[in-house]
Image (cartoon, rainbow, N blue to C red):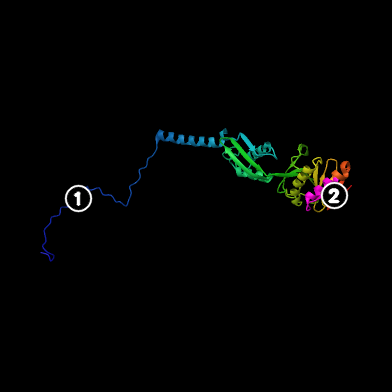
């Protein structure tokens, strides 16, 4: 008898652990390794290699992606051919980039946009890739203000006072934009017109006012020289009419109208100079 109470005799049977399959849960079994051998393995390897070769050929060497059409819209100041030539230059340029630029997949839009930015002053450029081989370029040009003449060269100039590009004067068949001849000492620098921007604002206003009241006066060009705050109109006959850009343009145009219609009349066309810058006093020669 034990101190905790009566004890009962129990019989324990021996357990044979050799017949049990025991596994340690903390150790994973070895993964099965499948080895490809023989003809099946060779077929799979060849198929993979051929697939990779095909992908390389299709993406890099196939003419399927070669740019075949370049279209530019929104152009007025330059031609489509100029844009196409710039695309062709980028495609044919030799550089350290191993990706073929003639391939539409790898044509670098940002690089081409930078090329246009250096050469022109477009307001906006949108480049679209039309798969598989077409490149569309949509351009928004800055509004032009005039044709700027300097050192016997002709340029389109925008409303911000930058020359856009040089042009052939023989191409100016119509007077779509007023001609401004710069005879001052301030010349173009870094594509920027160096004269007072107020002149570019005055020109269209003055042109409109003279055309409205005296359409018979043909304006050949406007002249800017070193005379302060002065802009001149020149007619095909050589008459130069001086205006004060800081004065009241309406009053100056009215005085010109009175001089032409009431005082000079038929003699107006024979004059060489008319100066309207001194209030009611008009000087002419």
For label 2, the SS is strand
**Residue closest to the eye, 78 or 50:** 78
Residue 175, horizontal then vertical, whole percent: 76, 39
Tell me if mark 1 has few (under 14), some (14-19) or many (20+) residues whose alpha carbon lies within 10 angstroms of its own. few
What's the magenta bit mostly, secondary-structure-wise? helix
Residue 45, horizontal then vertical, whole percent: 45, 36
- The quarter in which the N terminus is drawn is bottom left
Residue 239, horizontal then vertical, whole percent: 85, 44
Residue where numbered disc 2 is placed = 275
- In the image, 242: left or right of 114? right
Q: Decide if residue 273 is in sight here.
A: yes
Residue where numbered disc 1 is placed = 16
For label 1, the SS is loop
Specify the quadrant of the image occupied by residue 268.
Answer: top right
* Real-space Cα separation, disc 2 to disc 1, in angstroms: 129 Å
Q: Which residues are magenta?
A: 242-259
- In the image, 232: left or right of 73? right
Above or below residue 239? Residue 3 is: below
Q: Which numbered disc flags the more N-terminal residue, 2 or 1?
A: 1
């Amino acid at each position: 008898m034990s101190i905790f109470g009566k004890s009962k005799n129990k019989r324990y049977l021996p357990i044979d652990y050799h017949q049990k399959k025991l596994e340690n849960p903390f150790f994973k079994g070895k993964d099965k390794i499948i080895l490809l051998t023989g003809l099946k393995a060779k077929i799979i390897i060849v198929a993979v290699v051929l697939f990779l070769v095909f992908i390389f050929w299709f993406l890099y060497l196939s003419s399927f992606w070669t740019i075949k059409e370049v279209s530019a819209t929104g152009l007025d100041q330059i031609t489509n051919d100029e844009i196409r030539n710039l695309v062709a230059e980028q495609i044919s340029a030799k550089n350290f980039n191993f990706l073929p630029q003639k391939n539409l997949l790898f044509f670098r839009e940002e690089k081409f946009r930078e090329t246009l930015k250096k050469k022109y002053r477009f307001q906006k450029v949108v480049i679209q890739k039309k798969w598989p081989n077409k490149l569309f370029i949509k351009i928004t040009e800055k509004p032009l203000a005039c044709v700027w003449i300097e050192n016997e060269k002709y340029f389109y100039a925008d409303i911000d006072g930058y020359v856009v590009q040089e042009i052939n004067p023989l191409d100016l068949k119509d007077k779509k934009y007023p001609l401004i001849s710069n005879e001052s000492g301030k010349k173009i620098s870094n594509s920027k017109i160096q004269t007072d921007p107020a002149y570019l604002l005055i020109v269209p206003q003055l042109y409109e006012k003279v055309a409205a009241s005296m359409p018979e006066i043909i304006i050949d060009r406007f002249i800017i020289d070193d005379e302060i705050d002065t802009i001149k109109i020149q007619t095909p006959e050589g008459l130069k009419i001086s205006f004060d850009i800081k004065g009241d343009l309406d009053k100056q145009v009215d005085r010109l109208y009175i001089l032409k219609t009431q005082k000079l009349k038929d003699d107006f066309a024979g004059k060489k100079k008319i100066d309207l810058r001194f209030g009611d006093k008009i000087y002419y020669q």
